[in-house]
Amino acid sequence: MMKQLFVTACLLLAGTQVFAQSEPAYKKGTFYAFWGWNRGAYTNSDIHFKGRDYNFTLHEVKSSDKPSTFSYHNYFQLNRVTIPQTNFRIGYFIKDNVAITIGVDHMKYVMDQNQTVDIDGRVRSQFQDRINDGAIKLTEDFLTFEHTDGLNYINSEVEFYKNYYQRGILKVNGLLGGGAGVLMPKTNAMLMGEDRHDAFHISGFGLSAKAGVDILLWNLFFLRSELKEGYINMPGIRTTKSSSDKASQHFFFGEWTYTFGFSWHW
């Protein structure tokens, strides 16, 4: 579904060029900053765990995001604004309608608990009898696995804008963009009884592309929504307090963002 929405947005943006206005969406020299929230979806992935006395791979592991319940307390209280799945970005227009940006997509990734998956390799001896015909149930005493503080995609992007409608104080713009960055998750993993690592760490890289709609008022305040798709590869996930214990996985993601921000021209 996320992929279909992304393709549709790109086609709409490309296919409506005949309606484009001559006025730039944003002029050269404009800065912007936004804040907002996201929902995410992830493809199934193989997760490889390796330590001193185990080395195994879980296949086609299912996962979900973890949105906070909407309330003033969770979303707008100053000491809790980073708790939900959030997005922050700043950008600068190097020419009319073309911006370079840097930001953080604070997504959350949670392995679906109690699913049964195929497994190969060696687990610790006390869990060996959990494997039945090459499959294992992911119970809490065997494994919990989350990037919930979070799946932090720190990235730089190039964005291309087009103004489609302008009247008075109002502009409606479309945008396409893409970029790359690093993953700095705080992985919350409980693996076969070990204490979790519980610290931020650079674990891999990501690539992404996006399409969006931007509603700009007074060339100052805007509301924006984007659909983003990308690829994440994390070969160096820390799982326990032991530095020799690592996990690795790669997967595709889809992200829907809804943000608000300000722009200003120098």
Image (spheres, helix red, strand yellow):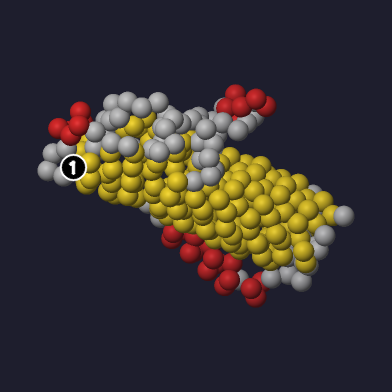
- Residue located 32% across and 37% down the image: 52
Secondary structure under badge 1?
strand
Q: Quadrant of residue 123?
A: top left
Q: Residue furthest bottom?
A: 18
Residue 99 on image: x %, y %: 71, 61
Q: Is residue 72 at least partly visible in the picture?
A: no
Q: Quadrant of residue 191?
A: top left
Residue 192 on image: x %, y %: 30, 30
Left or right: residue 43 versus residue 172 is: left
Figure check: 79 above or below 58: above
206 or 30, nearer to the observer: 206
Residue 205 on image: x %, y %: 51, 53
Residue that label 1 marks = 135
Residue 102 on image: x %, y %: 67, 52
- Residue located 87% across and 55% down the image: 266
Q: Amino acid at mark 1?
A: Ala
Figure check: 32 above or below 65: below
- Residue located 22% across and 41% down the image: 122
227 or 192, nearer to the observer: 192
- Residue located 62% across and 31% down the image: 81
Q: Residue furthest left?
A: 133
Quadrant, the N terminus: bottom left
198 or 17, nearer to the observer: 198
Left or right: residue 127 versus residue 181 is: left
Q: Is residue 264 at least partly visible in the picture?
A: yes
